[in-house]
Amino acid sequence: MLKLCKQGLGFVNEAMATTVSIKLDKNARPLFDFVGIDLNNAQSITRVNSIDNSEFPIPSNDKKLLNEIKKSYFKENLKVFSSNHHFKDADIILTITNCNLIV
């Protein structure tokens, strides 16, 4: 299984984390050991704690998304931290940047 580290746990990033962490191989095993990493500040720690309680950290009415994050967490292939030392063991590192275009 590949260890995939994702920088950032905002709304888009957490939805992507959930989507990637539920991806299964042909034998129905998780394809990735997913690790989400966020900053070490109050907002990020709140997000990390929510996910550690198998809850989506941002209010959402998407029942499928809420259910999938619980399944990924309990399968132990979705882990989150506010420490960046996990990057060193990653096979893959994902980063999304904010791109607000003004036309």
Image: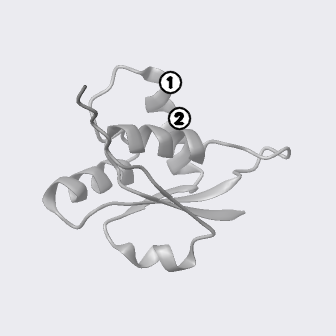
Q: Residue sitting at 56 percent across and 56 percent down?
A: 76
Q: Is residue 22 left or right of residue 7?
A: right
Q: Is residue 39 above or below residue 72?
A: below
Type of the residue with mark 1: Lys
Count of residue discs: 2
Provide residue 96's location: percent of width, then percent of height.
41, 49
Q: Is residue 12 left or right of residue 92?
A: left
Type of the residue with mark 2: Glu
- In contact (CB < 8 Å): disc 1 and disc 2: yes
Nearest the viewer among 74 and 31 is 31
> What colour scheme was applied to this rendering of the protein?
one colour
Q: Is residue 51 above or below residue 39?
A: above
Q: Is residue 68 left or right of residue 9?
A: right
Provide residue 43's location: percent of width, then percent of height.
17, 53
Provide residue 29's location: percent of width, then percent of height.
75, 50
Q: Pointer 2: what residue? A: 68
Q: Pointer 1: what residue? A: 64
Q: Secondary structure at mark 2?
A: helix
